[in-house]
Amino acid sequence: MHVLQPGYAREEQDGEHVGSTVTLIRDGAATIIVDPGMVASREGLLAELAGQGVTPESVTDIVFSHHHPDHTVNAALFPAARIHDHWAIYDGDLWISRAADGAELSPSVRLIATPGHTAEDITTLAATPDGVHACTHAWWGADGPARDPFAPDPAALAASRARILSVAAVIIPGHGPAFVPGDSTPR
Ligand SMILES: [Zn+2]
Ligand SMILES: [Zn+2]
């Protein structure tokens, strides 16, 4: 597991700057990017990747945590990658319908459906020697927000958070650095 870009959202003089967390997972033959993002610099993202010894062409799989552009617009940087979202796998021009919940990308990586931030949110669970890491937009960062202003169904989000916390040792949230969940984690 390696976070290529911790996500952020901040207001600056010229407007709102938003970048999603971009995470690299390597597991056997799979090289996975969870959320290719929106980033300040595509060259910078590819340099981070090169620093991990990974070329764009060698990325085998991309996961969209959900369909918002700040998490998806860079998918074409990785020409060989299959893309996984809540209801399908996209491989070249093949649209392979399937439900995400329980889908396995590699021996240690699987997807679960975690509706909340949007109805189409999925969480990527990666089993590591340090416990299960969850890449998810159920939290923007360690402090929540407790009430996601975008969530159409707060009860669904609470249920998804509970499901994630029942398995995850580390949360890699949509717009912030990784954190270990604790008593102060919004539920
Ligand atoms: Zn979003
Ligand atoms: Zn987001």
Image (cartoon, grey):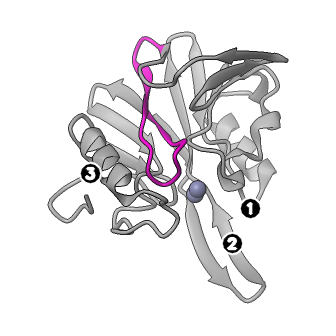
What is the C-alpha distance between the residues marked 3 and 2? 26 Å
Judging by the rendered image, the residue that carries numbered circle 3 is 180
N-terminal-most mark, 3 or 2 = 2
Q: Is residue 18 magenta?
A: no
- Looking at the rendered structure, the secondary structure element under dot 3 is loop
Judging by the rendered image, the residue that carries numbered circle 1 is 40
What is the C-alpha distance between the residues marked 3 and 1? 27 Å
Judging by the rendered image, the residue that carries numbered circle 2 is 17
Asked if the residues shown at circle 2 and circle 1 are in contact, with their CB atoms under 8 angstroms apart, the answer is yes
Tag shown at residue 144? none
- Nearest the viewer among 149 and 23 is 149
N-terminal-most mark, 3 or 1 = 1
Amino acid residing under circle 2: His
> At x 76% / y 29%, what residue is drawn?
56
- Nearest the viewer among 73 and 5 is 73
**Image side of residue 7 versus residue 60, left or right:** left
Amino acid residing under circle 1: Ala
> At x 14% / y 61%, what residue is drawn?
183
- Looking at the rendered structure, the secondary structure element under dot 2 is strand
> At x 44% / y 66%, what residue is drawn?
148
**Image side of residue 167 versus residue 6, left or right:** left
Task: Please give the count of numbered marks on the rendered protein.
Answer: 3
> At x 69% / y 72%, what residue is drawn?
17
What quarter of the picture does the C terminus occupy? Answer: bottom left
**Image side of residue 99 versus residue 82, left or right:** left
The picture quadrant where one finds residue 54 is: top right
Ligand 2 closer than 8 Å to label 2 CB:
no
Q: Which residues are magenta?
A: 106-124
Where residue 119 appears, x then y in whole percent? 51, 46
Where residue 53 appears, x then y in whole percent? 64, 28
